[in-house]
Image: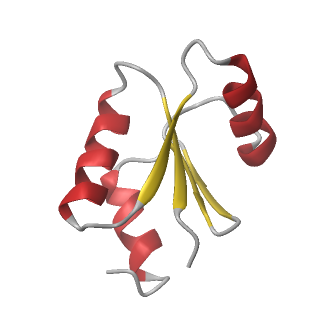
Amino acid sequence: MNKAKIYVKTGCPWCEEALAFLDSKKIPYEKIVVSGNPAAMNEMIELSGQSKAPTLDWNGEVLADFGVDELVPFLKARDVL
């Protein structure tokens, strides 16, 4: 498994919640802050078709604009939880 990429915005409560959840489950990820970073923002938009965070790239499968309630079934469906 490649390390997941999670695109986040500064001050986003859903982003902080998602990061805390991944940390609590010891799931490795690469955090990419899109705030003030046009290249990263464009990468996230190209990947997901939208500009809302958090956005997760899980080995090419994308979960965009989510909370932990959406993250849990996404990860369970991939046998991560």
Q: Nearer the viewer, residue 13 or 3?
A: 3
Q: Position of residue 15 (x, y in %)?
A: 37, 37
Instruction: Tell me: 47 left or right of 58.
Output: right
Q: Residue furthest right?
A: 46
Q: Position of residue 11 (x, y in %)?
A: 34, 19
Compared with 72, 20 (above or below) is: above
Please give the count of numbered marks on the rendered protein. Answer: 0
Q: Position of residue 68 (x, y in %)?
A: 32, 54
Instruction: Tell me: 49 left or right of 35.
Output: right
Residue shown at the point (40%, 72%) measured from the top left: 73
Compared with 57, 8 (above or below) is: above
Residue shown at the point (76%, 47%) measured from the top left: 47
Q: How is the image coloured?
A: secondary structure
Compared with 14, 59 (above or below) is: below
Q: Residue furthest top?
A: 36
Q: Nearer the viewer, residue 14 or 43?
A: 43
**Quarter of the rendering occupied by the N terminus:** bottom right
Residue shown at the point (77%, 41%) measured from the top left: 49
User: What is the quadrant of residue 38 in the picture?
Assistant: top right
Residue shown at the point (64%, 18%) measured from the top left: 37
Compared with 33, 67 (above or below) is: below
